[in-house]
Amino acid sequence: MLLRMLLQSWRYNIKRKLLAIITIFLAASLISALLAVSIDIGDKMAKELKSYGANILIQPASSAVLSLNNENKTALSAQDFLEQKELPNVKDIFWRNNIIGFAPLLTADVKAYHQNQQKEQYINILGTFFDHQIAVPDEDDYHTGQRIISPYWKVIGEWVDDMQEDNTAIIPALIGEQLAKSTLWHIGDQLTLYYKESDFSSKIQVQIKGILTTGGKEEQQLILPLSAVQNLLNLQGKIQAIKVSALTVPENELSRKARINADALSAEDYDRWYCTAYVSSISHQLEEAISGAVVRPIWQVAASEGVVIEKIQLLLAVVTLAAVIAAAMGIASLMTASIMERSKEIGLMKALGAYQWQIALLFYWEAVLSALIGGVIGCIAGWGLAKFIGIALFNTPLDFTWIVVPCVLLLSIVIAIIGTWLPTYRITKLYPIEVLYGRK
């Protein structure tokens, strides 16, 4: 009997049912897209935020007291260095697949002589990897450098090609924009760099290939391949620091406790922290892998990643809740109008002995069927919307996790039941005799 009444209701009231399906469809498509975005937004935003630079800095243990923003003015002969042969160890940790890339750093003040201007001046040089191939276990063609970890670097002219070791007589280099303006050096100019400390002295020939804009202190430096700077400074196989870019999860209470004192964590909390890709746990593992190093997260970058992702996910949650409320109100309006139209039918069912719960069950089933149909179609549309959002924001489609489908169907049913509850409650106020005589 219930099935027959449902079929008749859909047959003679199809327009209002379609309106209910469309209401559920719109809400379900938006909710499914937002859920897909919310699930995948962490990885996508983490990759996107990597454009703001590295989030981990590795230095010799003796450099731990130095500020990240201060240049080391100590004479090179009095400094401690990291060994370049330790670089592959960066990719030899539990979270190796989260390491996007890294770049070694070696800086010094040297004397530069410009051949056309016929004058000398002291400048700061930086030796690093631009896009350099390096032997890493289990990765045959691994290359890394500033072009990977610092995509915000903008070059007018040519990038330096240091994929392989280059032993040419003239070393290619990039010049920072501010240094270029202050020295009036241009692309194509050749310089001679001199370095002298104690009894050692050397020089190299450099040609400017491009002008670099970063918004940082690199704009005041001349940037060369690492090997060229090592040869100039007589520091073969030595580096001062390593910048690492890693995919991390946002900080939470556990990671903040570990940040203060990881040894104070319980065994269970320590294992959970160590096996989660927090910036602090990745830094801890890097410190274990690299001899004589202290590893510190660059908290300005790491903290901003977590804050941005959390705010975006909160915004998605608010929009999802608003969609649920709006859809429930739409369903309530449609069901109220349906009940008013079918008041005589309801009065007749009551007069024939139908129980209140039987009448309510009829309307709930109508709403649930509408919810299931609208929810399934909405999931399909939401999948397409999520792909579009991913391409528009990240130039790559977002992954649609199948757990979204049952979640959206469940929410669609909840929306339908919530929207049907108040109109169904009004059924209890209908008296058969008043309805059948047309008084209500």
Image (cartoon, rainbow, N blue to C red):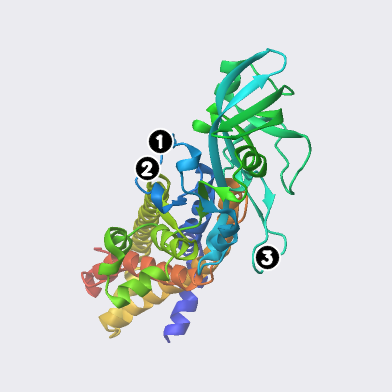
Q: Outermost residue, front direction?
A: 199
Which quadrant would residue 208 be assigned to in this image? top right
Q: Amino acid at mark 3?
A: Glu
Residue highlighted by disc 2: 66
Circle 1 packing at 10 Å, graded few (<14), some (14-19), many (20+), is: few
Residue 63, relative to residue 421: is it above or below? above
Residue highlighted by disc 1: 70
Locate residue 162 relative to residue 257 in the image: left or right. Answer: right
Please provide percent x and percent y for residue 200: 60, 36
Marks 1 and 2 sit apart, C-alpha to C-alpha, by: 7 Å
- Tell me, for residue 139, which label it has, or none: 3
Query: Can residue 308 be seen in the rendering of this structure?
Result: no
Q: State the residue in front, 236 or 344.
A: 236
Locate residue 184 relative to residue 68 in the image: left or right. Answer: right
Circle 3 packing at 10 Å, graded few (<14), some (14-19), many (20+), is: few
Q: Amino acid at mark 1?
A: Asn
Name the residue: 41% across, 37% down. 69
Q: Secondary structure at mark 1?
A: loop
Please provide percent x and percent y for residue 274: 40, 69
Residues at circles 1 and 2 in contact by the CB criterion of under 8 Å: yes
